[in-house]
Image: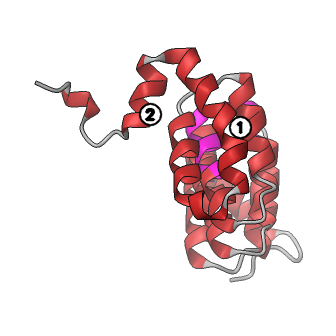
Amino acid sequence: GGMPWMEGVPVLTIGTVVGGRDVTLQLLSRIDGLRQDPAREWELLVAIQALSPGRQPEVQAKLLTLLEDERTQVRIAALTALGLSGDPAMLDPVIAHLDAGNVMERQAAADALLPLRPVGKTKAVLARLETETDSGVRGQLYVVLADVLGDGALEAFVSHWKRPGGLER
């Protein structure tokens, strides 16, 4: 029989977890080729997803270059993968994408922040909350801040709203 933890986990992801570094590097080496062929965007997205559990420096470097891809779906997949890596070193590039023009991309950046736990970056997240217009993204930013700040979250929100030009909504 199958392993119960494998239910619903993509085969490629299992490959990178079980096969370890060799499989991961093999997959990494295919990313650029997939990127150049617009017809293979789906394969590219699957490959990015498969790379996400690892915290290997080569993977992180590749995901960071994918944040600059011209296709929104690719940038979203890269943001999701960086979030899943759980590596706090990836916070700044993810936070930078909270300013993206595309709302789905901003949502992906906000979602990625939860597993990254932006301790020490709450001011940047609060600042983004001031200008964010989408309720879904705003909601997720509140969740992220509440998670990081715990009992101090309410205080942070209140002090932020009280200052001149704060959140008057």
* Residue 4 appearing in the image: yes
Q: Quadrant of residue 57?
A: top right
Q: In the picture, which quadrant includes the C terminus?
A: bottom right
Characterize the local packing of mark 1: few (<14), some (14-19) or many (20 or more) Cα atoms within 10 angstroms: some
> Residue at 55% of width from left, 72% of height from top?
136
Q: Residue 6: give x, y in percent of width and height.
A: 27, 31
The percent position of residue 22, horizontal first and vertical second, equals 57, 16
The residue positioned farthest toward the left in the image shown: 1
Q: Is mark 1 on a helix, strand or loop?
A: loop
Mark 1: amino acid:
Val
Pick the residue in front: 38 or 87: 38
Residues at marks 2 and 1, CA–CA distance in whole angstroms: 28 Å
The N terminus appears in which quarter of the rendering? top left
**Viewer-proximal residue, 22 or 143?**
22
Q: How did the renderer colour the structure?
A: secondary structure
Q: Nearer the viewer, residue 58 or 36?
A: 36
Tell me if 143 is positioned left or right of 37 in this view: left
> Which span is picked out in magenta?
78-91
Q: Is residue 14 magenta?
A: no
Query: For mark 1, what is the residue?
Result: 119
Q: Is residue 4 left or right of residue 18?
A: left
**In the image, what residue occupies the spot 78% across and 34% down?**
61
Q: Earlier in the sequence, mark 2 or mark 1?
A: 2
Q: Name the residue under label 2.
A: 13
| Residue 88 painted magenta | yes
In the depicted structure, whether residue 132 falls above or below residue 95: below
Q: How far across and how far down the image is residue 21, in percent?
A: 58, 16
